[in-house]
Image (cartoon, rainbow, N blue to C red):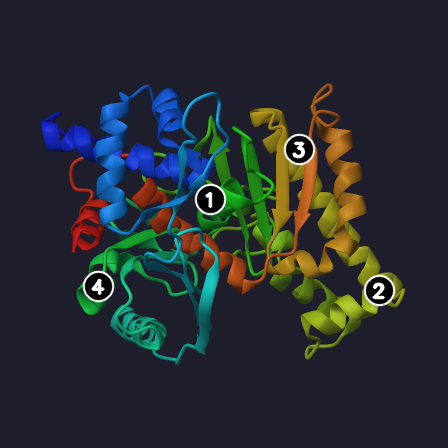
Amino acid sequence: MALRLRSANRQTIRDINQSLILGMVRARGPISRTDIAEATRLSLATVSGITADLIHQNLVYEHEAGASTGGRRPILLALNRRAGFVVGVKLTETHIVAALTDLTAEIVDEREVPLDADQRPEAVVAALADVVEALRATYPGQRVFGLGLGMAGVIARREGICRFSPFFRWRDVPLRALVENRLALPVVLENDVNTLALAEQWFGAGLGVADFLVVTLGRGVGMGMVLNGQLYRGGNGGAGEFGHVTVVPDGPRCDCGKHGCLEALVADPAILRHLRTALNRNDLTMPEAIALARGEDAVARAVFAEAGRTLGRAIADLVNVFNPPLLIVGGEGAGALDLLLEPLREALKAHCFDDFFSDLRLVVEPWGDDAWARGAASLMLDELFRPALYHGDEARASFRTMAAG
């Protein structure tokens, strides 16, 4: 779907300026009106008029007087982080994690519920709606601006469609519309790894970094890319399916239906499958496998080490293509990264081009489900604080309507 710029009428320009100023207060507040005008290159009269509206809407408040530079002390403006809430949801194949956050993505409350065996879209949406309504009921009368929803798979963000879910086996499900109709809230739908990349950009290791990659390891292998300060999604929302690059053409079958994918070699199910065969223990669990490897079991340690080397070689290809200054590795599989990390580093160093490895900062993040949900909340916050430049922007339109009310 091609992007269409909105016509630049007076209201559109004011909306853009309002989002710009609100984003400036969020990022740099407490901040004076004069400093906002200088940073945004808007007139002081425009800034004063818009900030008056934002104060009236209870989104911004006058925080305190700043230091004088010779005249009257300026009044500093700050974001009212409790002006309303957003909801972030991580949808997995087995459970739903939902977090209610303030306007700085700080978690106020959260819930986790298991999913039933019925995984039809309608049944999953009903379960999701129940947990979100339970969160909203805890804070009656409070504004909820919208919901960010992250899940694994190929997501067409602008259309709000799940093109393919490897776990639910969904194809072309209009998930955003289903959730919006059920909850009467604007929804942003995104690949779950992208939600983590956005969270890292907002308040993690990626803060202030224009280019970085996020690689997640656990039930699957995923990747998020921030390039030139923007989350890169690809032509139809499928960018980042790093787990499905072919490593061994005639290798083990992957959940996607193909053979030899990286995910089929290094993700948790692949490691567990290999160890169950090697140790002749069909009931072996992942925590038990990790314990064996940490307990100096030679077979278990060798399996984890080989997975680390394979992942390191594959990541080296990414580094050679993108030359990022920052690489963040984590996910639910980060609990075993101590067993993978050294072999991963060695392979990464051996296969990176020229000085790319020495220029790279590698960060390991052991995210929990709450971090994924917080990242999903950041999806909606990103919509709210980013200037509304395009037609069909239901999230920001709803935000303005609700804020004015």
- Dividing the picture into quadrants, the one containing residue 171 is bottom left
Check residue 316 in the rendering and tell me which mark sits there, or answer none: 3
Of badges 4 and 3, nearer the viewer stands 4
The three-letter amino acid code for the residue at tag 4 is Leu
Sequence-first tag of 4 and 3: 4
Q: CA distance from mark 4 to mark 1?
A: 24 Å
- Identify the residue under disc 4: 178
| Residue closest to the far front | 71
Check residue 294 in the rendering and tell me which mark sits there, or answer none: 2
Q: Residue at x 56, y 48 (%)?
A: 261
Element type where label 1 sits in the image: helix
Residue 294: give x, y in percent of width and height.
Answer: 84, 64
- Identify the residue under disc 1: 198
Of badges 4 and 1, nearer the viewer stands 1
The three-letter amino acid code for the residue at tag 1 is Leu
Residue 301: give x, y in percent of width and height.
Answer: 83, 59
Sequence-first tag of 2 and 1: 1
Q: Decide: marks 4, 1 in contact (CB < 8 A)?
A: no
**Mark 1 closeness class: few <14, some 14–19, many ≥20 residues within 10 Å:** many
**Mark 3 closeness class: few <14, some 14–19, many ≥20 residues within 10 Å:** many
Q: Decide: marks 3, 1 in contact (CB < 8 A)?
A: no
Residue 252 is left or right of residue 231, and the answer is right
Sequence-first tag of 3 and 1: 1
Q: CA distance from mark 4 to mark 3?
A: 40 Å
Q: CA distance from mark 2 to mark 3?
A: 26 Å
The three-letter amino acid code for the residue at tag 2 is Arg
Element type where label 2 sits in the image: helix
Q: CA distance from mark 3 to mark 1?
A: 23 Å
